[in-house]
Image (cartoon, rainbow, N blue to C red):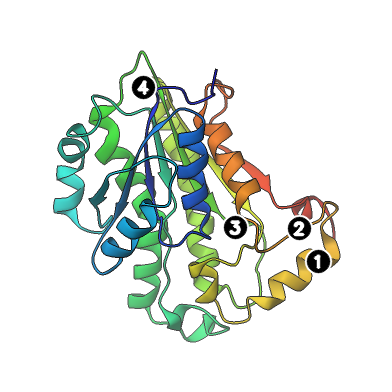
Amino acid sequence: MAILQDKNVLVTGVLTESSIAFHIARIAQEQGANVVLSSFGRALSITTRIAARLPKPAPVIELDVTNSEHLSNLSSVLKEHFPHLDGIVHSIGFAPEAALGGNFLNTEWADVATAVHVSTFSYKSLAMACKPLIQKERGASIVGLTFDATVAWPKYDWMGVAKAGLESANRYLARDLGSENIRCNLIAAGPIKTMAAKSIPGFEQFEDVWNSRAPLSWDVSDPIPAAQGAVALLSDFFPKTTGEIIHVDGGVHAIGG
C-alpha cells in the first residue's frame, strides 16, 4: 500500500515546477494522499496553473501566513476539502533584498522583522491555524524546510538567522504539540535552484561548496531527494520522531572544512 494512502495534506509554497514543494505534492499524491495547495496575491494564479501539472487535481486556497484573517479562517476553508488533516508542509521563506547579499551589519530591523515573520514565526502560526482539523487519535505530521543554520553561509545573512529561528521553533513546537500526537520535523536540504534560491546573491557559491564537499553526488537542479525525505516524514514510518532535522544534503553537514 502507498505510504500516504488516504491521508489529507496541505502543501504551502508551490510556485514553480522546480520547487521542492511541488515535488512533495506530486509524490504525496503518487503515494495516495489527498492534497490541497496554498498561495496568495499575485502568485495565486501561478500556483493554480502549476497545480494542473500534478498527477491529480489539487485545489488551491488563498493563504498569506502573515495575514491574521487568513489564518483564523484557515481551518474552515480547509474543511471544505478535508474532514480532517494528517499532514502540513511548511515551505515558506522570504527575506527582503536588504537582508541578504553581505549586508548583514547594515540591515534595518524592519527588513529583519519581515524575514523572521515570514520564515520563522509562520511555522507556529500555520501549525496553530491547522490544529482544529487534526484528530489526536490519527495524529499528524508537520514538515518544514530549512537550510543548515548551524553555520554562517556566505551572503545568506539574516535569512540564515531566520532559519536558525525556524530550527529552534521546530523543537519548541515539537515539545508543545507532542501531547496532541503531532510530530514536527524539518528537512535540511542542500542547495536547489528554486525561485527562492534565485533571490540569494552569490547562490553559485553554495554550488561550489557542494560540488567539492558532498560525499554523495549533489545536483542543484534536482529537488526530488528533499521532496522524498519530506514525504517520508509525512508518513507513518516515523511515528516516534519529532523535533528532528533530517539532512538531505549529500552529507555535506557531516564533513569538516
Q: Which disc is residue 180 wearing? A: 4
Q: Position of residue 162 (x, y in %)?
A: 47, 62
Q: Is residue 257 visible?
A: no
Point out the tag, 2 or 3, that comes first from the N-terminus.
3
- Between 36 and 244, the one lying in front of the other is 36
Q: Is residue 183 above or below residue 204?
A: above
Distance from disc 1 to disc 4, alpha carbons, whole Å, reads 42 Å
Residue indicated by mark 2: 218
From this viewpoint, which residue is outermost toward the top? 137
- At label 4, the amino acid type is Glu
Residue at x 75%, y 53% (from the top left corner): 253
The disc, 4 or 2, on the residue closer to the chain's N-terminal end is 4
CA gap, disc 1 and disc 2: 7 Å
Q: Is residue 106 above or below residue 162?
A: below
Asked if residue 138 lies left or right of residue 197, the reply is left
SS class of the residue under badge 1? Answer: helix
* Camera-side mark, 1 or 4: 1
Q: Badge 1 is on which residue?
A: 211
Provide residue 152's location: percent of width, then percent of height.
Answer: 65, 68
Answer yes or no: is residue 47 visible: yes
Discs 4, 2 touching: Cβ within 8 Å: no
Point out the tag, 1 or 4, that comes first from the N-terminus: 4
Q: Quadrant of the C terminus?
A: bottom right
The reply to whether the C-beta atoms of the residues labelled 1 and 2 are less than 8 Å apart is yes
